[in-house]
Image (spheres, rainbow, N blue to C red):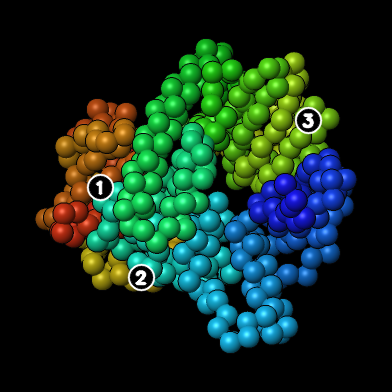
Amino acid sequence: DGTGLIISVDCGVSDIEEVKYARSSGVDIIILDHHEVPFTIPECVAVINPNRDNCTFPFRYLAGVGVAFNFIIALRGMLRGLGFWKDGNYPNLRDYMDLVALGTIGDLSPLVDENRVFAKIGLEVINEGKRTGLNALRKQCGLENDLIDSDAASFSLIPKINAAGRVGSPEYAVRLLLTDNMDEAERIAAQLDEYNKERQKMERVILADVIDMINSKTGVDKINSFVFASSKWHPGVIGIVSSKIVDMYYRPTFLISLKDGIGKGSGRSIAEFNLYHGLKESCSSLLLAYGGHRYAAGISIKEEDIDDFSDALSGAVDKDCCDDFAFVRKTLIDAECPLSEISYDLISQIEMLSPFGNYNPEPILTAKNVKIISPTTVGNNHLKMRLKGNGNGMPYDSIWFGRGQFADTLSGSTVDVAFTPKINNWRGESRIQLKMKDIAIPEKV
């Protein structure tokens, strides 16, 4: 089509053959990526990646959008120096930090250092309501009057934006973020909501399939990783389901979508196992292609090699996770706090540490000997309970996402709880709600 330059974002560092083909067609390539760097990188105009050994950039944990944004900062500076904007009216890049925040939070990048700045300022820009498409999406989510924090971005806005590329066309998300027409934005936001519902339906079916496969195995407790494949699974959804399996079983997991003898796989890992290094050192000879980082990776593989890949991955996990305790999820407690000490002032102090995310998690408090009252399952398998501490203090509402199956087990129990206190805004009212992280049932003496 006459294109002379392609700039890749969040991909490309492993695409040697593709870049070679582009160059043979007279197309220059600039790669902006943050994934782990393979032994050999593509030969092109530039490969910009903070994980390169010779990169002097002081922060290695940028998301793909962070690499692109820094590239744009540098490009703007050079163009200004060349007098590109004759009237001096150059773009204010703060106006784009809402997108940088969504990309950084959505990629689960560590919210420290530069990423923390991106997320904090970007969330401020979102709440200023300058982008028509995001305003329409907030309305679609019922959040038009709520403050958008990293939680609201992670669990409401970002899944709908991502759903377009997973089960529809990413063009819808691009149009939503570019339009200045509210009517068009609302139509697109409604379409994204439909895509997200479709994605959730697919996700539930695949999750049930995988759980059945796990239950059909003997000695599941002794299995250190999961690799499953099916021609029925949509490749755009398997990464989300892999995350859910890791959350449920705390094992490195790959799910593979098969088509015409080739599998496209998406993997997720645990804190104790570097997934990309495991692929690179133990599995690369079995793969057609692979890429990613510590906690997430994608692969391409021949169907006949999947069993050998499963064995190789298991061997890599064995090497790095040499004791059973590695496969036990840990809940790290920051402080003990009786329910009677929870207040709006305490929550306000905790919020000073936000935005929360990877490497900057919400503080987790614990209260002991707490009585569980009226546990019920709500929404998509969420556990809602009233919790009452010792003494005459008032009970608090709590929510434990994705744990509705424990409602009958916990009814009437006295337990130790791990939680983060939050402000729940609902229909114009604000009240304290405990966001549950874990529960321990004390052993009877």
State whether residue 443 is above or below residue 233: below
Residue at mark 3 to residue at mark 1: CA–CA distance: 47 Å
Task: Report whether residue 71 is seen.
Answer: yes
User: Which structural element holds mark 3?
Assistant: loop
- The percent position of residue 436, horizontal first and vertical second, equals 33, 47
The residue located at (35%, 67%) in the rendering is 129
- The percent position of residue 352, horizontal first and vertical second, equals 39, 71
- The percent position of residue 64, horizontal first and vertical second, equals 63, 56
The residue located at (60%, 39%) in the rendering is 269
The nearer-to-camera label among 3 and 1 is 3
User: Which structural element holds mark 1?
Assistant: strand
- The percent position of residue 32, horizontal first and vertical second, equals 71, 57
The nearer-to-camera label among 2 and 3 is 2
Residue at mark 2 to residue at mark 3: CA–CA distance: 46 Å
Residue 289 position by quadrant? top right
Residue type, label 1? Ser
Residue type, label 2? Glu
Instruction: Count up the numbered dots.
Output: 3
Q: In this view of the protein, which residue sits in the foreground, 219 or 241?
A: 241
Left or right position of 164 against 299: left
* Residue assigned mark 2: 128
* Residue assigned mark 3: 288
Residue at mark 1 to residue at mark 2: CA–CA distance: 30 Å
